[in-house]
Amino acid sequence: MLVALVGCGGAGSNSPVTSAPSRTEPEPVRPSAPWFAGPFADEDGYSLWLRYPKVADPALLAEYQAALRSLVVGQGSPTLALAAEELERGLGGLLGAAPARKAALQEQGNIVLGTAASLPPGAVPAQKLAALGDEGFLLQATLIEGKPAIVIAGQREVGVLYGVFALLRHLQTFRPLAQLSLESRPRIQRRILNHWDNLDRTVERGYAGRSLWEWEALPSSVSSRYRDYARANASIGINGAVLTTVNASAQVLTPEYLARVRAIAAELRPYGMTTYLTARFSAPIELGGLASADPTLPEVQAWWQRKIDEIYTLIPDFGGFVVKANSEGQPGPQDYQRSHADGANMLAQALAPHGGIVMWRAFVYSSESPVDRIRQAYDEFQPLDGKFRENVMVQVKNGPLDFQPREPFSPLLGAMPRTPIALELQLTKEYLGQDTHLAYLGPLFQEVLHADTMVAGTGSTVAKVIDGSLQGHRLTAIAGVANVGTDRNWTGSHFNQANWYVFGRMAWEPELGAQQIAEEWVRATFSNDPSLVAPATGMMMASREALVSYMTPLGLAHQMATGHHYGPGPWVNDLPRPEWNPAYYHRANAAGIGFDRTATGSNAVAQYAPAVGNLFASRDTIPDEYLLFFHHVGWTERMRSGKTLWEELAARYSSGVEQARALHTTWQTLRGLLDEQRFEEIAAFLKLQVDEARWWRDASLGYFGSVSGLPLPPELEPPAHPLSFYQKLGCPADPTRPRCPEIYTP
Ligand code: GCW
């Protein structure tokens, strides 16, 4: 069980806790030919993983060219047309020439695309197609009318589109075509990006430029970037977008804005994407002129019903709302002494006739409450299990605190068996180095999805809670707080693209391993050159653990300085709300450090299933990774390693810096294996990461050393500056492009 709780240091363990519906893909071919050694044309990252450079290995190229010569595609909707175009674009690049469109099968080299309505008769048995569900696809090397063909089929056209991207991925990662046989369908129904975009085009916790949505130009002018965005999402199976931030403005619900939303929805739709919005609970007051937004008042209900009907006349396939209510100052039903269920159900009732849903967030905590902040969401929501309408989901962040580099899974996951739960992950890395630091989130997501909640015995993984299989829900969803913006490379840094990518891939198939996805992304984004693939994948896989070590090792959390959540601030203890202070979380004093959440403390451990709670509660069984999250430990107590806690802490911080240095030096060995532009941009960020890792380590150890009164073990590097230097630093000046020039080395 230990293994299930902590993802083996991110080593990409792909433990088969549930049976995956997809067949595994064959291994990539190890190319024999010498590698094309540049110079590569510079790239700016706009193409993401959808680069289609010509296949470098001659034997493989010949195999692909022979098998993929002509394209047979029937009539369909714009989605089928897009699927065919994407295939032509991809093959045009990868094979040097797009397949010729043909009306009938050729003797050799056919690709056949379609659904039952558009495939040649007998291409795929009807039963097989039906088994693919709404979005699944099949890739099959077969004979049709005795002629060899690669079939890309779905029950619906969006499945065909996903199948096209899967075939292109197959080729991009140099896998053989012979005996190709792959069936795949998503385990989770709604795979959604949550944008935290404001209508003024600033992005809350956004580090990649401005919001993609050009509200001022819409609806008359529609940016071509919306399609590129939708296409990228479709390529990894993301099928929804919430366009606006959870700290919502009611303005998006005005007719002027809804016309603009409609224009965006029209761009996303052909790519299989559903549009959602956030709803501000007080909108009936702000827009409707009502005196109250009390969900039990008929006039409030009627206002929402009219508004929702209006939305559906404009956007018939509108997905529904995400709502942040009574959280961090947002209005909500508790303003009227009503419960979260009353609020959610009122909206859900109005959405139900249209097939819409409510994703009601459980991220609530109150500064007035003396209760441990991490307990509050569970205390508030768990008793409401069974009280929500059937088109309500409760959306829960992966951890009980707030998107930390590492925290245990939220105890709400699994604890509301009668309520469908949507898992909320954060791609934008608010607490993980934001735009600059390389921190590949695959291992973090895997750790959460594979964590065993034990709510219904061993094997009750978070993945099974979310895919509905454990507790019998058909409504299933996973949300990722988006990391994209107007930056040319979309995500502020090249490596941050991988976090968008891995979210989509794991949302489709939670059992896919972080390592496998990292490798796939590296091959598509940089190159299949073996001398690049292994080191770059290794860097990604090591990166998150490195960051945990230099920022918040051994279960520490929320040590980031005020507001920007970027640099270290463990000494901060003077903010008006207690839970805004890092000191609230580390509780360091002369005796020790850590938050006692056992029965002698806040007893948050009791919110977990007993097997998990007991494991966390005992010093003998708790994994080191979560130690200080649940225990206050004496500075000189012995750890499993034999070191004292203080020595262990110092060693972990220091190893984080070492690992950051290793990321930088490994990258230097890859010069010449990709284009200069991306190489240099990445190298520059890795250099900042080394300096900032050092900043984190020196500032944190400086502070904790001042509290413990213990000296740094002599074998460790002395800090670059005294504690007072770090305490006085005013950086970053710009929270959307956080930098700290004062600590950078030349
Ligand atoms: O992570 C915190 C962020 C807030 C955010 C909030 C939330 C959108 O610091 O910026 O607000 O969580 O998830 O609601």
Image (tube, rainbow, N blue to C red):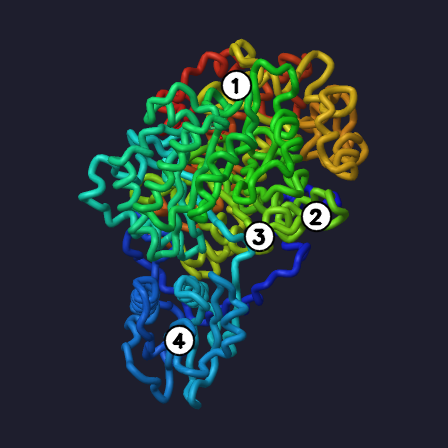
Disc sitting over residue 460 in the figure: 2
Q: Report if residue 60 is visible in the image.
A: yes
Separation of marks 1 and 3 at Cα, in angstroms:
44 Å
Q: Amino acid at mark 1?
A: Gly
Please name which of the two marks, 2 or 4, marks the residue nearer to the observer.
2
Q: Secondary structure at mark 2?
A: loop
Residue on which disc 4 sits: 64
**Dot placed on the residue nearer the N-terminal end, 2 or 4:** 4
In the image, taking residue 686 as reference, residue 584 lies left or right, namely: right
Compared to residue 713, the image places residue 515 above or below, namely: below
Please, what is the three-letter code of the amino acid marked with disc 2? Ser
Name the amino acid, label 4.
Tyr
- How packed mark 2 is, by other alpha carbons closer than 10 Å (few <14, some 14-19, many 20 or more), is many
* Residues tagged 4 and 3 counted as in contact (Cβ below 8 A): no
- Amino acid on which disc 3 is placed: Arg
Q: Nearer the viewer, mark 2 or mark 1?
A: 2
The residue that disc 1 covers is 569
Residue depth check, mark 1 versus mark 3: number of the one nearer the observer:
3
Please report whichever mark, 2 or 1, sits nearer to the chain's N-terminal start. 2
Q: Dividing the image into 4 quarters, which one contains the C terminus?
A: top left
Please name whichever residue, 179 or 376, is drawn nearer the observer in this view of the structure: 376
**Residue pointed to by mark 3:** 474
Please state the horizontal and vertical placement of residue 225, each as a whole percent of the image: 27, 48
Whether residue 698 sits left or right of residue 347 in the image: it is right
Q: In the rendered view, does 623 fall on the left or right side of 164?
A: right
Quadrant in which residue 597 is drawn: top right
State which tag comes first along the sequence, 3 or 2.
2
Chain-order first, disc 4 or disc 3? 4
